[in-house]
Amino acid sequence: MKKLFRIYITIAFVFCFSTVFSQRINYGKVDSIISNLVSNNKFSGVVLIAEDGEVKYNKAVGYIDYANQKTLNKNSIFELASVSKQFTAMTMMMVKEKGLLNYDDLVEKYINIPYKGITIRQLLTHTSGLPDYQAMMDAYWDKSKVAGNDDIINYLNKYAPSKLFEPGEKYLYSNTGYVLLASIVEKVSGRDFIEFCNTEIFNKLKMNHTAIRSLAEKAAIKNFALGHVYVPEKSAYIRADSFPSSNYTIWLGNRKGPGRISSTVTDLLKWDQALYSNILINQTTLTEAFTPMHLNNGTISNYGFGWDLRLGENIVWHNGDNPGYKTIIIRFLKTNKTLIILCNNATDAFEHLTAELKNCIQAPFVR
């Protein structure tokens, strides 16, 4: 009888221990956090949380267009901004896996640029020292025309703004590097970058709402979330593209690599789950994406190939920021949990929301 009693006690203890300390997400708290921001007019967007690839929370709040009060839905399409970079990095890993190049090849082997000694790996990890192309184009480009990658590269050669530091010396986020990466993929594959992404990634993963879209293509989509900024003088959210500061998205509207992908939360979850498989590339190749970069002085930069790294927490992530938009995808690698937030009323509350929801996913929920 005593033996049987011990068994019962042991079973009860194990059950209680697993219930209290298992990584359960408090979705009631998640909903409360989002609702609080909405009630204070601080958030418009879509939030998705998944566990083992299964959607556990998916909520759309706010408006596609504040002016006409058209509401967002779970399938609304958003600009991803720099979240696009992980897809550019994937195309580079794909062509590398096919033997078309190596990460330590010099960029000058594939593209004529006035900066020598920079490797593809340094482009991927933002350690190239390249100057910002946008400032250069803003100074010299005829803004009645729409610039693409070839134009940017031609202007880099024509005006040759100085390097910011020697390659590999330090980390500094560089949109220029990701323009060059897309152009290198085109060079070695013999294919247009947009077609390559469509065929090799979006179509393969059935990401049916994801594409690199022109301004006209975006305007034709009724469910495309428009970016907004808050204007205190009017106590209202106004379309971001009505301000001159966003004009670069028009006259740089043909650039490829650093941004321009638009997508939905459910399509991004398909992408997230594909990275646990060999559908796109094998896992050995993918390991490079989540490996920190060693700088020239031996220190580590915690940015891989298109991903920010927090390996101590087993987290990889990337955010995006365009006029009127803020976006993020966080992958919790050890527990296969995913947080995706797409926002179209860019405010400082976005960072607070991200931190709060991340904490909900990481912190045990005592039932």
Image (cartoon, rainbow, N blue to C red):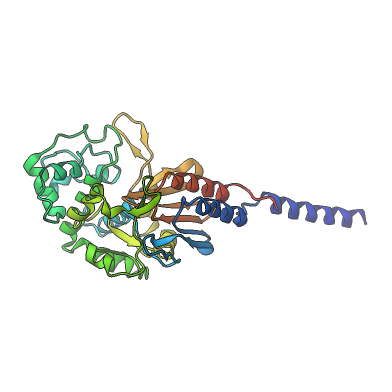
Which residue is farthest right?
1
Which residue is farthest front?
234
Query: Which residue shows up at 16% across the image and 53% down it?
Result: 149
Query: Which residue shows up at 65% across the image and 52% down it?
Result: 22
Quadrant of image for the N terminus: bottom right
Residue 245 in the image: state x and y as whole percent: 25, 47
Query: Which residue shows up at 44% across the image and 66% down it?
Result: 73
Query: Which residue shows up at 34% across the image and 56% down it?
Result: 227
**170 or 292: nearer the viewer:** 170
**21 or 13: nearer the viewer:** 21
- Rendering quarter of residue 261: bottom left
- Tell me: residue 247, above or below residue 70: above
Residue 85 in the image: state x and y as whole percent: 31, 52
Residue 349 visible: yes
Residue 214 visible: no
Whether residue 61 sits left or right of residue 248 in the image: it is: right
Residue 345 in the image: state x and y as whole percent: 39, 53
Whether residue 33 sits left or right of residue 242 in the image: it is: right
Which residue is farthest top?
297
Residue 315 in the image: state x and y as whole percent: 47, 47
Which residue is farthest left?
158
- Tell me: residue 231, above or below residue 204: above
